[in-house]
């Protein structure tokens, strides 16, 4: 049996697909380029004096997505364009500040995810030095759902029943 292949060059990420295209997947930094961190647990449990468990579903089911790019990455040009429109014109620009952020591994060997209401919160610091620098862009999302993004989006109506 063959070992599963990890192919970081094949990963595909899309944010706010009307504005940011597949170039989001171009120009990642050379080492650790993406970190996805849930804000916390989905539920908390408590054990009463009688020994029975109570389960509390927590409201915060979001997370933080950080993607590090080389400073000359095509994705940064698009991200900066969206951010500039929001900074200069604001809501009148018609550019949505938040959207769906998806991560897909076409090999199927790493977990995919969908981030609902993912908002750009930090464009990252710009540095100039002897060699190419990196910028880390950060999004916060309302819901962080691990699984196949296409299946999740296709089944939303069945989840609401």
Image (cartoon, grey):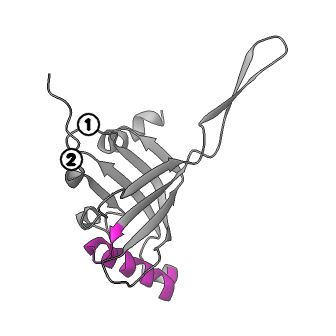
Q: Is residue 33 visible?
A: yes
Q: Residue furthest right?
A: 49
Q: CA distance from mark 2 to mark 1?
A: 9 Å
Reply above or below: 108 against 94.
above
In the image, the segment drawn in magenta is 69-90
Q: Can residue 95 be found in the magenta stretch?
A: no
Residue 32: image location, x then y, percent: 36, 56
Residue 110 spot, x, y in % from top left: 30, 39
- Residue under circle 2? 7
Residue 93's place in the image compared with 112, above or below, is: below
Residue 46: image x %, image y %?
Answer: 75, 25
Residue found 45% across the figure and 34% down from its top: 159
Which residue is under mark 1?
109
Left or right, 74 with respect to 141, comes to left
Q: Are marks 2 and 1 in contact (CB under 8 Å)?
A: yes
**Residue 106 figure quarter:** top left
Q: Position of residue 104 (x, y in %)?
A: 28, 47
């Amino acid at each position: 049996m063959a070992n599963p292949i990890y192919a970081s060059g094949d990963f595909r990420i899309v944010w706010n697909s009307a504005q940011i295209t597949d170039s989001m997947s171009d120009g990642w930094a050379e080492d650790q380029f993406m970190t996805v961190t849930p804000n916390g647990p989905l539920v908390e449990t408590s054990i009463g004096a009688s020994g029975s468990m109570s389960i509390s579903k927590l409201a915060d089911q979001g997370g933080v997505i950080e993607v590090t790019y080389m400073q000359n990455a095509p994705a940064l040009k698009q991200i900066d364009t969206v951010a500039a429109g929001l900074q200069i014109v604001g809501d009148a620009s018609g550019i949505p500040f938040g959207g769906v952020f998806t991560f897909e591994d076409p090999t199927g060997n790493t977990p995919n995810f969908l981030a609902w209401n993912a908002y750009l919160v930090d464009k990252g610091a710009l540095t100039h030095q002897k060699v190419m620098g990196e910028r880390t862009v950060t999004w916060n999302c309302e819901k962080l759902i691990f699984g196949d993004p296409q299946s999740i989006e296709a089944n939303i109506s069945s989840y609401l029943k």
